[in-house]
Amino acid sequence: MIYKKFKDKIKIYGKADFNPQHILECGQIFCYKKIDDFYRVWSKDKKADIFEETDGFKIVSNDVNYFVDFFDLNTDYSLIKKHLNKFEIMKEPIKFGSGIRLLKNDVFEILVSFIISANNNIKRIQNTIFALKKKFNSEKFPSHLQLLSLSVDDFVNLGLGYRAPQLYKALRQFCEEDLKRWQNLPTEQIRTNLINLSGVGPKVADCVLLFGFWRKDVFPVDTWINKMYNMFYSQNDNRIEIRNQLLNIFGDYSGYAQQYLFYYQRSFVKK
């Protein structure tokens, strides 16, 4: 994919390997909005507006280098798709979500967001996260210290429901230095550390590993992936077993495969 950096924008040439709808609506991020004919996305204290143009896309931001990294623009996704297209199950999902790219999200933001996401729908998750931001009168995602200042009742009033005491407890079980230290650990050890946190089960842990720690050797299994597996492979509702089977199939490309399959399965069934 060819792109060019300017002072306040990134110009992406072509549409084969970049599509903001595919990227933002495939379940890896919640801090975005569709505004008229463009998407606005927030990460940490940064934001970017993405516009479609005749020959590609334009990303407008006051921190161009951050969003080059955030959108993983230096990775050749045509090669990733070429590899995954060897698997029959991947052909239609890749065609459907051809513009997906894995975002390099902030790990704390992802951890909090996916604790909120448990047994929840995307619209409600987004509303809760934007309510958290509004609580601190900022577009920036709240810091660990800010969230520690909130009570369980505060979280309930902001829309977390039964997840309120879980997030309240989890925030007191780790510090930001822990998250930095975990970056250097093997995937299985990080998973264990995450599952020891309140409100984090295997699926949420794998989402945090993939979207926050950027580990590709994981395969989050939710309802949609479970259904896909039963349709294409065999009947099995043990999600740990399904995860391990899919990891054996896709190996180091598992994280990428999961996103194409999840986006296709959820979108296709809804349509």
Image: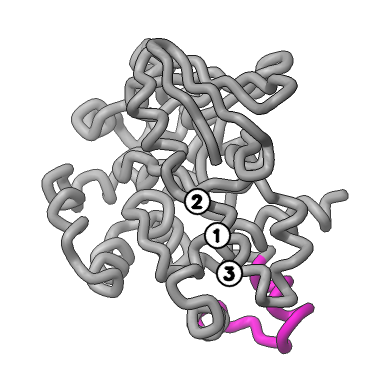
Q: Which mark is residue 76?
A: 2
Work out whether residue 46 or residue 85 is closer to the camera in this orientation and state it: 85
SS under mark 3: helix
At which x and y percent is residue 80?
Answer: 54, 61
Q: Mark 2 or mark 3, which is nearer the start of the sequence? A: 2
Q: Is 265 on the left-hand or right-hand side of 256?
A: right
Region of the chain picked out in magenta, as a range: 225-240
Q: Amino acid at mark 3?
A: His
Residue at the (51%, 53%) spot, across then down: 118
The Cα atoms of the two marked residues, 1 and 2, are separated by 6 Å
The Cα atoms of the two marked residues, 3 and 1, are separated by 6 Å
Vertical side of 219 occupied by 171: above or below: above
Q: Is 239 on the left-hand or right-hand side of 150?
A: right
At which x and y percent is residue 70?
Answer: 40, 36
Q: Is 162 on the left-hand or right-hand side of 142?
A: right
Give yes or no for contact between labels 1 and 2 (Cβ–Cβ under 8 Å): yes
